[in-house]
Amino acid sequence: MQRDLQPVTVNSIAYPVNETFESLQGEGSFTGTPAVFIRLQGCDVGCPWCDTKHTWRRDIDAMVSMEVINAKTGEAVETWTWFDLQSVARIVGSTRARHVVITGGEPCQFDLRPLIALLEAQGCRVQVETSGTYAPQVSPTTFLTVSPKWHMPGGRAVLDAALSRADEFKVPVGRQADIDRARDRLAPFDGVALWLQPLSQSPTATALCIEAAQRYGWRVSLQTHKFISIR
């Protein structure tokens, strides 16, 4: 059973990290951009198709050392540990990328402002990827990607506070109803880039996305990192 774990050092700011790695952003507006990814542990949204289900639980039995996390090479395992601000900053500073993607899990469970402030002070641009089910606590210049997860098993509602802050929408599409919902629910936010992302690289879902993009003037995001076999 998952336990609501807190950092051991009460007076420090720390985040539960599943992995960090340098790659290319494969989705949305920054497709092809060199980036360093900070993947946080913990998510209660419960998307059935999620390809990072190993980040859902934050159990003490899966807590390991920072050295173990830093040595990960893409294993989809539940291991995680607390990283303080300086540890994250050192990892980012050791990479070539100046674009940082904070993802998960669900990163907006946490107040990300202290971490983002430090990364931006290092000259980085920060992008946060969220389901829209938590109010984002980010800096004014953070690029917020909202992938709205409506009616998921976790029972969390997509919040207007997240939708109204979005710099782009990335909508997972498996069937026509997903497109219809995006059209209806995101209409008030006209002007924000809207990407349709086919689930599981399905040809049927891809065809739906292409047709809807042509019809409504939206865009299609194809998870290019999977096509070229990178993380």
Image (cartoon, rainbow, N blue to C red):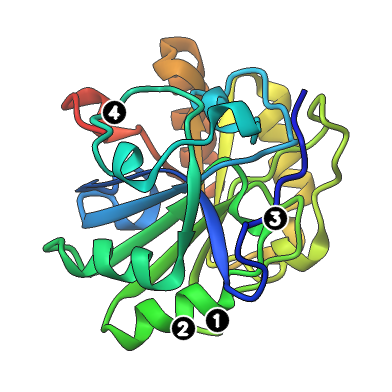
User: How busy is the neighbourhood of tag 4: few (under 14 within 10 Å), some, or many (20 plus)?
Assistant: few
Which type of secondary structure does the marked residue at label 4 adopt?
A: loop
Quadrant placement of the N terminus:
top right
**First in sequence: mark 1 or mark 2?**
2
Q: Nearer the viewer, residue 201 or 118?
A: 118
Mark 4 lies on residue: 74
Q: Are marks 1 and 2 in contact (CB under 8 Å)?
A: yes
**First in sequence: mark 2 or mark 4?**
4
Q: Nearer the viewer, mark 4 or mark 1?
A: 4
**Relative to 64, is 53 above or below?**
above
- Marks 2/4: CA distance? 27 Å
Mark 2 lies on residue: 117
Picture quadrant where residue 42 is located: top right
Q: Is residue 84 left or right of residue 229?
A: right
Looking at the image, which residue is at 29% across and 44% down? 67
Q: Position of residue 162 (x, y in %)?
A: 72, 63
Name the amino acid, label 4. Answer: Gly
